[in-house]
Structures are given as C-alpha cells and as structure tokens.
Image (cartoon, rainbow, N blue to C red):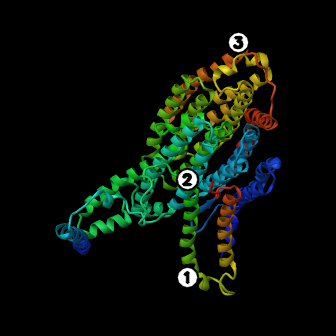
Amino acid sequence: MALEYGPVGLFVIGGFVFAIVALGIAYLIRPADTYDRKLITYECGIVPLTPAWHRFRISYYIIALLFLIFEVEAAFLFPWAVVLRDLSGPQAWGLLPLAEMGIFLGILLLGLVYAWRKGDLQWN
Amino acid sequence: MPYSNLSVFAPELSLCGLAILVLVADLIVPRAWRRLPAGLAAVGLVVPLYFVARLWQKAPQSEFMGAYAIDGLSGAFKILLLVTGFLVILLSFDYLRKLQRGYGEYFALLLFSLTGMMLLTGAADLIVIYLAFEMISLSCYVLTGYMKRDPRSNEAALKYFLYGAAASGVMLYGISLLYGLGGSTRIIDIAARFMASGPAAAVAVQPAFLQSALVQAGVPELYVMRLAGLMMPLAVVLVTVGLGFKIAMVPFHAWAPDAYEGAPTPITAFLSVAPKVAGFALILRLLLVWYPELMGHWPALLASLATITMFGGNLWAIRQTNIKRMLAYSSIAHAGYLLIGVVVAATNSMGLHGIIVYLVAYLFMNLGAFAIVLLVARNMDGEEISDFSGLYHTAPALAAVMIIFLLSLTGIPPTAGFLGKLFIFGAAIGSGEWAWLAVVGIINSAISLYYYMNVARVMYFGKPGEQVLTVCPAGVVVVAVVCLLGTLGLGLFPGLIIKLIQQCV
C-alpha cells in the first residue's frame, strides 16, 4: 500500500521543517552586525592568502589520488577482516584469504612505490 | 575445490600480471635499457595467448556464479585482441623514441586496456561489463593524450574523455533500468526472468522488482505492464548508446575523428581495432542471450543504425585531407558493415561467423594501413594525404603494399577484406529479411572505393616530394609484412580460417 511510505514522507517533511524553523529562529534573534573582516572565509583562524578559485599545484592532485586509493583500500579491508576468521583454517580455505588480501595490498603498495620512485611525491 | 575456477581466468590474470611486471621492470632498469620492459610486454603476450588457446579447446562454461563466460566466441575475440596488442606494441617502439618520461608506463597502460577488453569478451554480468568498460576507457584516455607537449593530443584526450564519460553515464543508467526490470545483474538471469513470463512480446513482460513495488503501491497491474513495456526498450536503447560509443557507431561517433587524429599514431591504430573487437564481442553476447525475449526490436534498431553508420562514415571520409582522419571515418564505416553481421546473427549463425572473419580481415588490413602511415609520416614529417604524393616513385614497394591494404579495405578480391564482406553480405542475403542491408553495404563499398583509390591516385600520379624514404624502423616493417601476409593469405587461402572459426564458435 502507498501508505507504507507514509513515515518516509513524514520524515522528509519533518527534516525540512526542522531546518527551516531552526535557521529562521536563529535569523530572528541573533544580533546582526556584520563587517568585512567577519565575512571572509574561515580558514582555521588564519587570514586566507588567496580566493579559493585560483590555480592549484598539480601535485595536490597526485597526493589526493594516492590518498583516495588507500582510503578505498580501507573500505575493502574492513569487510574482509570481519569474515576472515570464518574463511580461514583447515576446514575452509586455509591461508588463501590472507594471501589474497596480501596480493591486493601488494599491488596497491606497488602503485605507491611507483609514484614515489618516479618523483611524483617530490614537492618542488 | 572452492577456488579451482580461477583457472578460467588465467588469460586475464596473466595479462594483468604482465602489465604489473612491465611497470616494475620500468622502475628497476636503468634508462639506457628502457626498451627492455617494452620488449617484455611484447614477448610476454605469449603467456595469455597460451592460456586462451588451452581454454578454447574446452567445453563452454561459465564461472563466478555465471558472471563470466568461457566459450568459443570469447576465445576467438581474445586471440584477436592479443594479436592486435602485439602488433600495436611493435608499432610503438619507434614512435616513442623521443619520449622523455613514462616510456614503460605506455606499454603497461596498453596491457591494462587489453586486460579490460579481454574481460569484456567474456563478461556475462552487468557489473562486470561496466567494470571492463571503465578499464578499457580509462587506459585509452591516458594513451590518447600521451604526447603531453602536443596540444592536439591533449585536445583529443579531452574530447574522448568528455564524450566517453557521458556515454558511460548513459549506459550505466540503462544498466540500472535493466537491473530494476530483471531483478538480477547476470544477463542470463534477466533473460530467464523474461522468458518465464510467457510470450516474447515486450509489452507482456513481468518486471520483478518494479512490478511488485508498484502493484503494492496500488497502481493497477495493466499500467505497470505498460510502463515496463516502455522501460525495457528505453533500457536497451541506453545500453546501445554505450556500446555505440565504444565501436564508434553513427550517431555516437563524434569523438572518433578528433581522437584518432590527435592520438599518437600507434594508439590510433589500437583504438580503431581493439575497442571495436571488444565491443562487438559484447554486442554478440547480449544478442545471443537476450534475443528475442528482451530485444525483439534490436535487430531493426541496429539495421537502421548500421545504414546511417555506413553512409555517414563513407561520405565524411571523402572530404578528409588528413590520412588519420580519413582512416577514422573509414573505421566508422567498417563498424557499419560489421553491424550488418550483428543484425543477421540474431537469427542465423552465418552472421556470427561473418563478423569474426571480417574482424580478422579488418585487423590485418587496418593495422597494415596504419603501419604504412607511420612509415610515411616518419620520413615526410606529416600525416596529410598529400604527403603520400608520388610515393610510387620514391618507394615503389611501399606504395604497392599500401595499395593492397586499400584494396582490402574496399573489399576487392583476392584480399581479406573481400572475404569479410563476402561473408557478411552473403549472410544478409541468405537471411532474406535483411537482404536490403547487403545492397546498402555494396553501395557503400562503391562509395569507399573513391576515397581509398584517391590515396592510390596521389601515390601513383602525384608529384614526388624531394625527400626519400630513409628510415625504416624494424618494428613497423615487421607489422607491415605480417599484415600483408595476413591480408593476402586470408584472401587467397580462406579455407583454413573458415574451418577454424566454424569449428570453434
């Protein structure tokens, strides 16, 4: 029945209402004295050097890419770690699950070594 | 044994391992020996080839819970892919001589791309199909833009990437609809679901998830049926867009001329053959599993697309002055001829054999033509058709070999191209229903004669330039000779290959 989706609809509406009410009340009761200093981007308390729309070093891109790869690797590691005990041992597949993750990590690590050796981690 | 089925994956695993080995070797060996990893890449292809040949003799099977198929069809396509990869590696040695950085990486990327293509030939699961698609595309984008200092190469890579990303998104949407309607990502399960629901008419399908959700939501069943009847063709069309991009089918071809012109010439040769081989493997698999339950109208759709692809490719090719652009449009036209085979293959195994014969012929004649283009460009420092001017006077042998490739591309006996066209058009005529496609194909072959023979005219009657051909890189010459032998051998002794294909596929 369509009514089964009712709670979902209520939840969505409730979410919007909550956000609008909370922000609206804050808008009404907060003191409004803004000046230029206050409106600049908050960057950990340091005065920003440039606007956000400027050219970034391409090195950031490589670092971000490497970071992303190892981030995703972690996402694969957790489910693997959860089932490892059930998969391993003489009754199941022995050391194979461990070896498989070793191969996976080895290939990823090789990528890091490759980037390092090719000088992509040099910062100059 | 729970993991014995890895053996069916041996070709792809060994190819992937080879690519990693090439990367490591590139890391270790000193710069003076940088050709070593590249040579390793070429020689190493023997290993996956051996595994493919061994699996080819076994009975068809599917592994990984039906997600990956091993059969004669995928075996034949894998051999074609590996041969293409080998010849392209040979073409690349000389072209990359001035490359400062990333010499070994180039070959590793080529092998990774090849791995994706091999995966695509056996893919029987929507997720695997998409994964293989991305594996191919990502490597190819990088390879297209490999000449970083050349603005044209950059432009080509960007256009290829933007177009490819859009096509991949569209295809993914189609895949999601198919999954929603069929309730599984395995193509065989989706087919089974539709078959179980009775007659083949697309309107009468019983979509699994969608139906239950909508009917529970109170929508009358009749409307649900109609909705599904509309969604199924939509999903098939969206997937066709993704496939059309890979094989450069009109109207999804717009990226091809620019990407082909700007890419390094060996990569152009690679792009004009290998993705097409992989793409047609997938088209055939979808057709063989899904026709007619899911794809009752697919042959008709493909027949119209084949027609505009042939006409588009051939008519645009006439106007080109750059030989790489001309060959790009010619490769679009060849995709059109191949599509005729697909249309026929829905009902007739002749079409299937025709496609494979045609692809073998196309591999040799197209790579051969690119080898000659490389040789001329190396000496004349240009890739215009006018650079071929008077080639007959400065290098008669080269001109003669080029003529053979051009004749074969046109489809004139006794060359491989003739055999391919004979099979495809013959199958179309034999099917009765699609005989008109053969007529369209023959008209288009006549059109293509004009621009192929235009190159011949320039070579034989044009004024020779001052430069003579002095540099003949061994790798390129070997490819030219192999392709010449292949083109003529297939044309003169067709019996052998036909027998092999009919036995195995």
Q: What residue type is labelled 1?
A: Val
Q: Do the residues labelled 1 and 3 touch (CB within 8 Å)?
A: no
Q: How far apart are marks 2 and 3 (CA)?
A: 46 Å
Q: Is B170 situated above or below B51? A: above
Q: Quadrant of the N terminus of chain B?
A: bottom right
Q: Is mark 2 on a helix, strand or loop?
A: helix
User: How many numbered circles does the render carry?
Assistant: 3
Q: Name the residue under label 2.
A: B133
Q: How far apart are marks 1 and 3 (CA)?
A: 74 Å
How far across and how far down the image is residue B107, in percent?
71, 49
B231 relative to A60 in the view: left or right: left
Q: Mark 3 points at which residue?
A: B463
Q: Which amino acid does label 2 sit on?
A: Phe
Task: Work out whether residue A82 or residue B117 is closer to the camera in this orientation and state it.
Answer: A82
Residue B127 visible at all: yes
- Label at residue A69: none
How far across and how far down the image is residue B57, in percent?
73, 58
Q: Is B39 situated above or below B339? A: below
Q: Mark 1 points at which residue?
A: A82
Q: What residue type is labelled 3?
A: Lys
State the image quarter where residue B8 is shown. bottom right
Residue at figure coordinates x 70%, y 55% from the top left: A118
Mark 3 belongs to chain: B
How far across and how far down the image is residue B365, in percent?
69, 34
Residues packed near mark 1 inside 10 Å, few (<14), some (14 to 19) or many (20 plus): few
Q: Is B254 situated above or below A9? A: above
Please tell me if label 2 and label 1 are on a single chain: no
Q: What element carries label 1?
A: helix
Mark 1 belongs to chain: A
